[in-house]
Image: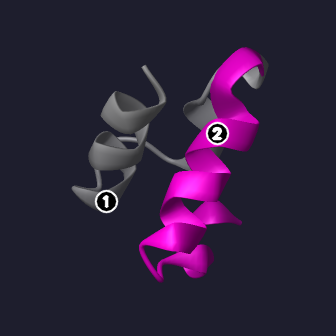
Amino acid sequence: MAVIYATLIIKGKKVIGDVPSTVKDQVVEILVEMDLPELAK
């Protein structure tokens, strides 16, 4: 589920605030690993 949210954030369909708290940390980790930490703010 975290990968799906990260993909949607990268595509501009969602923002980090839309991500449920249960997977938010994983999504942030994925975005940072992809050198996109600015999308995790």
Residue 39 horizontal/vertical position (percent): 53, 68
Q: Along the line of sight, which residue is nearer the eye, 16 or 6?
A: 6
Residue 36 bears which disc, if any?
none
Residue 26 bears which disc, if any?
2
- Callout 2 amino acid: Gln
Say which residue appears at 58% left-offset and 71% top-offset: 32
For the C terminus, the quadrant is: bottom right
The magenta stretch spans residue 38: yes
Q: Along the line of sight, which residue is nearer the eye, 40 or 14?
A: 40
Residue 29 horizontal/vertical position (percent): 64, 55
Residue 7 horizontal/vertical position (percent): 28, 46
- Callout 1 amino acid: Ile
Badge 2: few (under 14), some or many (20 or more) residues near its Cα, within 10 Å? some
Say which residue appears at 22% left-offset and 56% top-offset: 11
Q: Along the line of sight, which residue is nearer the eye, 32 or 5?
A: 32
Q: Which residue lies under the disc numbered 1?
A: 10
- Region rendered in magenta: 22-41
Q: Secondary structure at mark 1?
A: helix
**Real-space Cα separation, disc 1 to disc 2, in angstroms:** 15 Å
Residue 31 horizontal/vertical position (percent): 51, 63
Mark earlier in primary sequence (1, 2): 1
Badge 1: few (under 14), some or many (20 or more) residues near its Cα, within 10 Å? some
Q: Is residue 34 above or below residue 26?
A: below
